[in-house]
Each structure stands twice: as C-alpha cells, then as structure tokens.
Amino acid sequence: MDIFITQLSNGLAIGSIYALVALGYTMVYGILRLINFAHGDLFTIGAYFGLTILVSFALQGNVSPLIIPWILIIMAAIGVAIIGFLLERVAYRPLRNANRLAAVVSAFGASIFFANALKLIYSPNRQSYPADIINLPNIPIFGVDIQSKRLIMFGTAVLLMALLYWYINHTRTGTAIRAVAIDQGAAKLMGINVNKIISLVFIIGPALGGAAGVLMGLFYGQIHPEMGFSFGLKAFVAAIIGGIGNIPGAMLGGLLLGVVEAIAGGYVSGSWKDAIAFGALIVILIFRPTGILGERVADKI
Amino acid sequence: MIKKTMLALATGVSLAFAFPAFAQDVRIGLMAGLTGPYASEGQDTKRIIELMIEDLNAKGGINGNKVQLVIEDDGSSPGTAATAATRLASTKVPAVIGTYGSAVTEASQDIFDEAGIVQIGTGSTSIRLTEKGYERFFRTAPRDDEQGRVAEESLNKLGFKTVAILHDSTAYAKGLADELKAQIDKNGRVNTVFFDALVPGESDYSVVLTKLKSANPDAIFFTGYYPEVGLLLRQKKEIGLDAPIIGGDASNHVDLIKIAGKDAAKGYRFISPPLPTDLDTPVTKEFLASYKAKYGTYPGSIWSVASGDAFIALVEAIKAKGADSEAIADYLHNDLKDVQGLSGKISFNEKGDRVGDLYRLYEVDGDGNFVLQPE
C-alpha cells in the first residue's frame, strides 16, 4: 500500500506536467482547430529560460528556496508567452485562411526551428538545474512519506489550472474566448475582436507550457533541447484522452496518463509502461471516441 | 607536325592533371554523434581526431600524403546513423572511424560492409556486432561478455549478495544486462532480485526507483548510459533509496556528476576501461598534453580516446599498405600487433575484436572525481 501511494504521487507529479502542457494544445485546438505541434518546444524553451534566469541572476543562495520556483515560473512564463505570441503572428496568422494542412506544416517547421535554435544557443548537450536548490522535508500522507516537491508540483499545476478555469468561465474575456471557440463568425458579429482573442490564447497556452517546463527542470533536474518532442507527444495524447478542445478534459487526461504510466511502470514493467499507457488511450477512444469529457469529434486531424 | 604538337600538348596536359596523384590526400571518414543525447562523446571524438590529424599532417602525414577528415553526424540515433553511413559510403573513403553506442553502430554496419569500407567502432561493446562475420568491421572497445564477467566478479568482491539489474532496452544495455545475469546464474555467488528496464531520455525515474526500493537489493547494477545514471543518482537520493548504484562502462562520463550533483554522485561505482588520465604511457601523456593545450581540458571519457586508438591503427595500416580497404582490413587482422595506442596496446583478433584485458573498477569521490580502485 505504501508503495502504491508513492507510485500514485509519482504519477500525479509527472501527470501535472502533462496536464499543463496539454492545456496549451487543447486551447489552441478549441479556437483554431489546429494542433500546435510547436507547443512541446515552447515547453522546452520554458525550461531553458528558467535555468538561464536561475543562473544569470544567481538566485540560488540569495533568495529563499520557497520563493525561487515562483520567480522562475513567472519570469519564464512571461518569456514563453512572448514567443508564443510571435509564433502565432509569424507562423499561423498568415496561413489563417489557407489550407488547414499548411498550418500543420508550418507548426512542424516552427517546432524544428525552436529545437535547433536551442541547440545553437545552449549547445546540444544536456543541461541540469543545480541539485540542491530546494531541499524540503518529506511530508507524511496516509502514513507514507511523500516528497514535498511532488506536492509542490501537483499544487502549482492545480492552482494554475483552477485560475485558468475561473478565467475562462467567469470573466468577460473568458466568455469571449468561449464564444470564438464555438463560432468565430458569430463572435465577430457580436463585436468580439477575434484576432485579439487568438493572440491571447497564444499567450496563455505557451505561458502555462513554459511554467510546466520550469517545474520539470526544477524538480527532475535534467533538460535537453529535444525533450519537447516526447513531452509534447504525451501531452497531446493527454489532451485527446480528456477530449481535445475541452479544458477540464486536458487536466483530467494529463493526470490520468501520468498515473496510468506510474502504475504500469511500477507493477508491470518499466519498458512496457508507454505501451500500456498508449494502449489505455486506444481503449478509451474505442468507448469514448471524443475523449472522456469531449463533446465534439476531432474530425480535422 | 601539328599532330605531334597536339600530342605533346595532350601529354603535357594529362601529366599536369595526373601530377597531384603523387601527393594525394588520404581521406578518412569519421561518424560521430555530434548532436543528440551522446553529443558530448561525439564532440570529444571529433576534437580528438582533428587534433591527431593536425599533428600527423604537421609531421608530414602518412608517407608524405596529408590526411583529410570527412565527418558525418550520426545524431546519436540509429536512424540518422544509416543516413550518415550512406553519405560517407558515397564519398568512397577507404575507412571510417565510429561510432559511440552499439545500436547506432549496428545501424551503419551493413551499409559500410556493402560499400566495402573498413569500419572501426569506438564506443560499441555489444557482443553481436562482431559475431555477424563482417570482414571489415573492427572495434577498439572491449566486448560486453568481458564486461559482464568483470561486473559479476566485482559485485562478488564488493560483498553484495542480492543485486537488481536495470537496463534501458538499447542493444548495448540489454546485451550487457543479459550477460551479467548469465554470469551471475552461472557462478551462483550473487542473487538477481530484480530485472527490468527504464525508458531512456525521460526526466522522471521515480517510478522505477520506487519499484527498486520495494525489491530491496544490496546493490543496483545499471547497464545504461551516463545521462540516465546522473538522473537515477539524483532522484535515488531524493526518494531515500540507499542501495548503491554500480554502472557499466557507458556511464564513465564527467557529465554525470553535473547532472547528479556531487553529493548524490559520491560513492557511485562503475566498471570501465581505464580513463585517459589514468594511463601513463608516453604516447598517452604526450597526447593528453597536446589535447589540454589545445582545448583547455581533458577528454571526458574513454570512448572518445578509443577513437584515437582506431585512428592510430588506421594510420599504421595505411602507412604499410596504402589507402585500400581490403589491404587495410587484411593488415589490421593479421599484421597489426601490440601497437601502442592511447588506451593501451592495440591488436585485433580474427573477428575484429580488440585483444586484451582492459576493465577496472572506479569510484566517485566527494569532489566528483573518478578514482581508480586498486585491483
């Protein structure tokens, strides 16, 4: 039982990262019906921004370890948000009325560009966050010592997701975002500036992805320029499990994928965990073709 | 008359064109992982070979011919390696050095074999690479069965009764893990209580570490590569798993200290051929001094240095037999005996494997240095 709870916490922690990244996929899909394949790389950029800020401002030792994560998350999120905004302007907006496949190709191009830019700037070698930034005691839950960093990751992710959920559902701008997602033409007739809303989505999604990147680097330690691919893929799967285009679905899908992976890795075999996790995806899609919380069929891609 | 002049002219012209053939450059191929997860190894390899060629050319090259390097990046991945090998084959180099990673090397073997090019693997220790009967494949790395034997020997000597074996499903790591398990079963001095794999390239290994914790072994033997070792050490400390990790020879890279942090890396042991800085032959000392002078540091691992061995062997062969693939392969098989290389004496057996006893046990000290353990 102890082992089970520990594995559950492992799964929820990595699942929080999947969920945060999945939100970016799902928001963009919800609004543009576009899979932003460069999103995984925005996550990677967030991790590198975090490391750069940590090192260049010499935060370690000068700032309380409880505050460092927040500084890094906020600053990296802002940086990645700017890149996300530019990405939409340069790579997607000119293709808004073109063939849908053109935008997908453009997304892949942007992804390759980002990965290689990171290699050029930071070298293709793996980088690591210093090992002893945050040393916190374990916290006992149900009699099991859970690492406090797991709780911080999970807590931060849930907090960010709750904020987003509130923002989308209880503010005027959030209402506008939902309106654009449902019908762009009608939203325009209602006086909503669709271009602005799309830009906003490309700010919020990447900011969350960047925050996830910082959490990843801070708590797991190692980052490399191509990690966005595998994380992006997992998060994309999480978004589909939950029902792409659906925000609570992305959160649920991410956490579920993390937990299924942890249980599969912990009780079956480490080398089979991806096969089992993706097998679970297939089973879910057989019974719920639109994902667990999805209403629409993902018919475009 | 006109005809004669024309003939003279033609002869003159053809002579002029033919002339450079006397001082033709010898081209040698290098396939290395300049990008991808093992980029540190690949970059090091490139630096070493470039340095050695520079020195050699400054001394007049091979029999007066300058040596020229043709480099292709294998991206540390089998897929990219196949492309890189095809491109190298199309340049018609007689011999290729490389590469790091058994799976990566394996992806290129067929292509070089078909093109008739001599290939000398550097960081490729998987047994089956030399069991396929390729006439022109050699390696300066030792084989995994040798390593498996030494690993079992060391586990026993260190007094561990139960061991968990962890690999990463790559050709190399799986091969070594199987070999170690076979040795353990054969000798019956140590028990295997856990045998599983992790997925390389991930960031979070807490799941497999938690599982290891519940298996409660005396020691964990991980056969994979240094990036994963670094993370395992770091995350092992965080989850409070006390069993020490012992690694195979793919983990002897200084980067693992950077990833794990000095605290978590302390006490980590691994089996490896001696590190460059522990070699004290005059040839090696001279090489290390010129490497340090040019790049300001020492090579990070033994595998890039093994590429230097491959280069030395090739130069010997070309010096004796010329830049012809068949002659080079023949020379390496039959005539090359105990040439002083960077990591020790070089000779190859009929399979193309390196002959000799290379493995040692290392331990990481509190400052992140790799310390050679007395035998």
Image: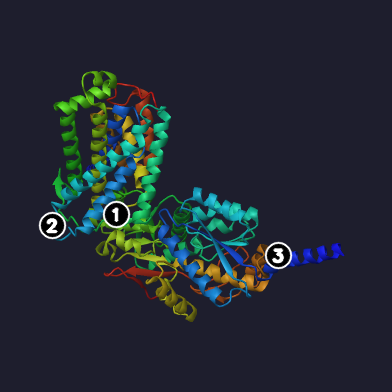
Residue plotted at (42% across, 27% down): A99
Q: Inspect this view and state whether residue B163 appears.
A: no
Disc 2 crowd rating (10 Å Cα; few below 14, some 14-19, many 20+) is few
Q: What residue would you read off at disc 2?
A: A63
What's the chain of the residue with tag 3?
B
Circle nearer the viewer, 1 or 3 = 3
Q: Which of the 4 image quarters holds residue B134? A: bottom right
- Where is residue A92 shown, x and y percent of the image? 35, 34
For marks 2 and 1, give the CA distance: 38 Å
Label pair 2/1, CB-CB below 8 angstroms = no
Q: Amino acid at mark 2?
A: Val
Depth order, front residue of B360/B108: B108
Q: Do the residues indicated by labels 2 and 1 lie within the same chain of the protein?
A: no
Q: Secondary structure at mark 1?
A: loop
Disc 3 crowd rating (10 Å Cα; few below 14, some 14-19, many 20+) is few
Q: Amino acid at mark 3?
A: Phe
Q: Secondary structure at mark 2?
A: loop
Residue B216 is tagged as: 1
